[in-house]
Amino acid sequence: MSVWTVERVAALAPDAGSASAGQGLASLKKWTLVAANAGVAGGAGGALWGLCQGSGKDPYQTRIDLAEPAFKCSCPSRKFPCKHALGLMLLYAKEPGAFKPQAEPGWVSEWLEGRKEKAEKKAEKAAGGGAPAKPVDEAAQAKRAAKRDDRVREGVASCATWLEDLARRGLAAAKGDASKEWERLAARMVDAQAPGLAALVRRTAEATASGEGWEVRTLDVMGRLHLLLRAAEKLDALPVDLAGDVRAALGFAQSKDEVLAGAGVADRWAVIGQAFEEEERLLVRRSWLVGACTGTPALVLDFSVIGAPGQVMDPSLVAGFEFEGELAFYPSRAPLRAAVKSRGTSGPLAAWTGSAAAGVGLLGYAKALAGNPWLARWPMVLTDATLARRGEAWEVVDGEGLGVPLRPAFVTGGGGGGGMGLWRLLSATGGRAATVFGEWDGEYLTPLAALVGGVYLGLAARWAA
Amino acid sequence: MSASPPARLKELAVAAVLGADRSGADAAGLLTGAAAAALRARAGRRMVAAAGAPDLCPVDPTPAAGRAASATLDRLLTDPDAGLIEEWSRLAIAAGRRVPDAAAPGVLDWWSRQPQRSAEVFQALGARGAWLAGLNPAWKRPVVSAEVPADAESRWEVAAGAERAALLQTVRRADPARAMAMVRSTWSDDGADDRRKFLEVLAAAPRPEEEAFLEAALDDRSKLVRREAARVLTRLPGSALRGRMNARAAAIIAGETQRKGLLRRQVVKITITPPQAFDKGWERDGIEEQVAGGKGKRAWWMRQILAAADLSVWTNASGLAPAETLEAAREDDFYADALLAILEAAGVMNPPPDLAWARALLAEAAGRKELAWEALAPLWTGRARDESEALRLEAAGVERFAPAARWRILGADERPWSPTFSGRALALLKASAGKKLEGWELWSGLDQASRLIATEAAGALEDVVGSLHEKDMPDGIRKILDRVRLRADMHREFQA
């Protein structure tokens, strides 16, 4: 049976509109031809193709390389993957039997050949080191970095002054309609190229208006901000790994290439869950991974500009899949963020032994926090987990009868297919034990997925409702 | 520092609200302390003994729908169409399948927000449906269910109008005597609107043992209830009310044998004589004295009587078959009014009049230009599907009707079309269309057809519509055809 379930294919859609259009095309009637090559019978790999009659004279030629997966379609859409590719793949997920093995026609084999050649060239380049395509102007780069450091230093100084002033005057005074002043400060931090500071300033403002217990939450964020500002003041004196955490917290974009050039950690990496969040005009995808052998947790971030066509997040990171490969970690006292350095065979995540979850959970979180106090989220795996109710609130309870509270937004839901997290989890388990994957933020758990009887169930909302 | 980190953070927060200046603290020290306490509190969080777990959902032996059918259901939920979700549920039940667990909350949530909550959808949810509905107060249970609740009598006493009517329907299906006892137990205290609603429940299939109660309701203090009771009794075969109506009708209709023409052939002629005066006793049986429009009073009284009488009154008067009976009355001045009343009576009669009557009336109405197609609708009301289909095909074939009327006639029964009927209907539409589908009437006819047509004929429907719109198919029509395709997929997915 194909590893491509309808749910997994749907997760590849770049937006809700494409997902729905793709569903509409996932019907044999829409295609004058659907076929597959011999590779498909083998399991995870192989290629699919189909002809779809659109509004034009000639039918669209849609091709899919399942190994990656990769897509190519002759339609003019700037969405990627386009609705035809999604429709064809959904159709394959629904009715694999309809795709009879055939010899590849020219328009398919040429594309596959081209992909193979490119991959080989890339591998050669990586193996032989090779000269970089463009000589790096190191002097200019250093100059840019120095200029940025200056601006951030200025930003840090003005933010520190503001924060101490706030602590002196008292939160009661600031609680009024100071939001405009705070927004100005946040905007100044963005200008100072420290978006991480801007986000903390905004969160302080939000905390003052968070109702009962607002003063504790506000002071909590202020403490975090204070710690960051203090560390930023002596950034140059910090060890490399800690400096990495400070830079990340300040919101520096870190070079992925540099990270990938470093050593990798090999394991069988399970993508236990994915969360999507909108930040400004950016859609951020957090993919949580856990090494099946070592229990090492990892976080891979992907970004795409909302509304920008042609942007697609790495489709090879599919929730509920695991792959043999290497991850390269960003410099940190408590390494968590990582980039995929290499990947080999992959397959669906069908079982969780539980023994490998040593690094995840509250203890792992506490240890990581000791290294990186600005850590925002941590992955959690609860085996033999059930759901329990405490008044209006719900908890996830592990096999030993101990529970953590669920994020209220997960319980109430926000409408739309993704807003029913709790209820989908309850319905899938029927109240019985399952493995639950989620994000812990120090206060609440947000479940992202569950393994119920060997079936992976994604729970996170893919698109904002 | 003896306080726990969360307590320490709270202490510091009190100082922070006042401000370091007033609380005598050092601002930087306050912030550093807060950072440390908050961090300790976060790192020190431990799992706590669990709260109460809900009861387990009973194991459902029914297997979930297959992969393809489940994917189709997911698609239906992204843009919910009540008809399609209900059809999916019926197909699942027939195939011995149920809604997959992952989709159950979405279906239940959608269903709970529907004004008409189909019992089939809830049934297709299986054990999960009732279990989930019990955990989330926002979700509902079916109003009319297959099982009679054990506490039906006590719920009957406390529930509100619509729920009581639904409860009555449920109980009556299983135990009509128990349902009647429930109605009687509160009848004298119930409001007029409730009383009318309960009678409406009986109207679907009134029973002889309910006649005495209904007769008594003809003297109800509320006019609404009296009218409804009369309507129900009209639908009860052999009721005393029908007998009274038949006697009144017989006084209106008279057949006589005349000799006509050179050969002095025997010809039967029916004369129609509307009542001269209004009998106050008629009011009790639901006959209105005052006329609504500008019609003559006598014709109005006559119409109400004939519409509630058996059609056998006519054949008894003529001694002829239905078609000849109509012919014998055709010359009469009151025939046009009488024909409308007969058509109405055909829709009220329970069981419906035999096919010879329906065919004779159809042929008669076809020739009368003043009658719109809607006047024919009573002819197929309440009939078995094959009879209804045969009559609708005949009606849709009436030459004077425009294409829009044909589509509407074919779709004027809520039951799904049989494959044979689907094929014949399409052939008829194809032969009579000849131009583009324009205007809402045509579209709504096509829309209705797309919901009812047998999925075996889905391709043929596409061909018919496609041949009318080779180049420029409007999006609206394209969407309607998509629905037919989706239904065809759905049926196929449950056969596999």
Image: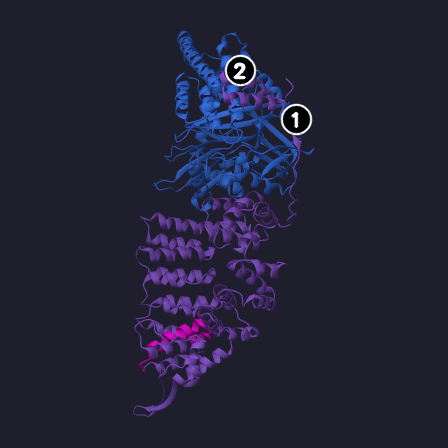
Chain colours: A blue, B purple
**Count of numbered tags:** 2
Q: Is residue B259 above or below residue B252?
A: below
Judged left or right of residue B427, residue A265 is right
- Location of the N terminus of chain A by quadrant is top right
Q: Amino acid at mark 1?
A: Ala
Residue A93 numbered tag: none
Q: Which residue is mark 1?
A: A356
- Chain under disc 1: A
Where in the figure is residue A34, as x and y percent of width and height? 47, 41
Q: Is residue B185 above or below residue B254?
A: above
Crowding at mark 1 (Cα within 10 Å: few <14, some 14-19, many 20+) = some
Q: Nearer the viewer, residue B250 or B361?
A: B250
Q: Which residue is mark 2?
A: B25
Crowding at mark 2 (Cα within 10 Å: few <14, some 14-19, many 20+) = some
Where in the figure is residue B161, as x and y percent of width and height? 51, 60
Q: Nearer the viewer, residue B401 or B125?
A: B125
* Residue at disc 2, secondary structure: loop
The residue stretch that appears in magenta: B332-360
* Residue at disc 1, secondary structure: helix
Q: Quadrant of residue A83?
A: top left
Q: Nearer the viewer, residue B443 or B495?
A: B443
At horizontal 40% and vertical 24% (from top left) the residue drawn is A183
Q: Quadrant of residue B295?
A: bottom left
**Quick one: which residue is furthest to the right in this view?**
A400
Where in the figure is residue B268, as x and y percent of width and height? 37, 87
Q: Does the magenta stretch mainly form a helix, a strand or a loop?
A: helix
Q: Amino acid at mark 2?
A: Ala
Q: Can residue A296 be seen in this snapshot?
A: no
**Marks 1 and 2 in Cβ contact (< 8 Å):** no
Question: Gap between marks 1 and 2, in whole Å?
Answer: 47 Å
